[in-house]
Image (cartoon, grey):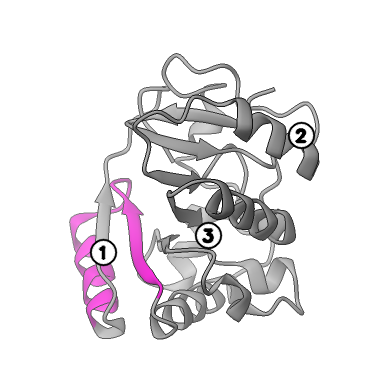
Amino acid sequence: MTIFYRFEGKMYINITNGCPCDCVFCLRNNADSIKDNDSLWLEHEPSFEEICKAFDEFDKTGISEAVFCGYGEPTVRADMLLRTAEYIKANSAMTVRVNTNGLVKLIHKDFDLTRFKGLVDSFSVSLNAPNAKRYNEITRPSFGEKAFDVMLEFAEKMHEMGIKTVMTVVSVISDEETAECRALCDKLGIPLRVRAYVSDNESYT
């Protein structure tokens, strides 16, 4: 069961298969792993003890960044994410990044976003579309169109808290829509990164 794995010089952390979205471009619809890593489908959601043991045994040589991003949305297990981030920071000099759909407040209604401060150094938030209608079509969240505004509010809050925040789109949308996304990000004061869509396991989410 793959909890930690290396990709492009970073240590990636896979703590859940769960996700409230079903993005049209999601790699897990087409492949079981990234490049030559073992399958990222978890047999079960790992306990904190299993995560710590896997971290301690993982070869971290030359790695400076830990990234929560596996085959599920890491904030589905927000409490475990934070416990794991705290353990990583206590036992390494790595920075911590979370790749997220930004819907933690819909997944966990009472979650306090300020808990991320000091444990997460940066967020990559999936924007994916310039408006709620297109977001619903592309991301297909179980929460419906209201998810778009919640995602934007999350990114804005993290940015306001001083946590480095980037928003991303995948190149399955038109150039015009990408330009609209860039204008939206400019308005929020948050950088936009455009990710190329590749349908096999040479790409990454």
Seen in the image, is 14 located left or right of residue 26? right
Element carrying mark 3: loop
Seen in the image, is 39 located left or right of residue 66? right
Given the image, on which type of amino acid does mark 1 rest? Leu
Residue that appears at 24% across and 71% down: 180
Given the image, on which type of amino acid does mark 2 rest? Glu
- Mark 1 or mark 2, whichever is nearer to me: 2
Residue 185: in magenta span = yes
Element carrying mark 2: helix
Residue 44 pos. (x, y %): 81, 32
Seen in the image, is 37 located left or right of residue 142? left
Given the image, on which type of amino acid does mark 3 rest? Asn
Q: Observer-nearest residue: 87 or 193?
A: 87
**Label 3 to label 2: alpha-carbon separation:** 25 Å
Mark 3 highlights which residue?
101
Of the two numbered discs 3 and 2 on the same chain, state the one appearing first in sequence: 2
Residue 16 pos. (x, y %): 69, 42
**Label 1 to label 2: alpha-carbon separation:** 35 Å
Residue 179: image quadrant is bottom left
Mark 2 highlights which residue?
50
Residue that appears at 29% across and 77% down: 184
Q: Which residues are magenta?
A: 163-186
Asked if residue 23 can be seen in this view, the reply is yes
Mark 1 highlights which residue?
192
Residue 105 pos. (x, y %): 66, 74
Asked if residue 20 can be seen in this view, the reply is no
Of the two numbered discs 3 and 1 on the same chain, state the one appearing first in sequence: 3
Residue that appears at 59% across and 80% down: 114
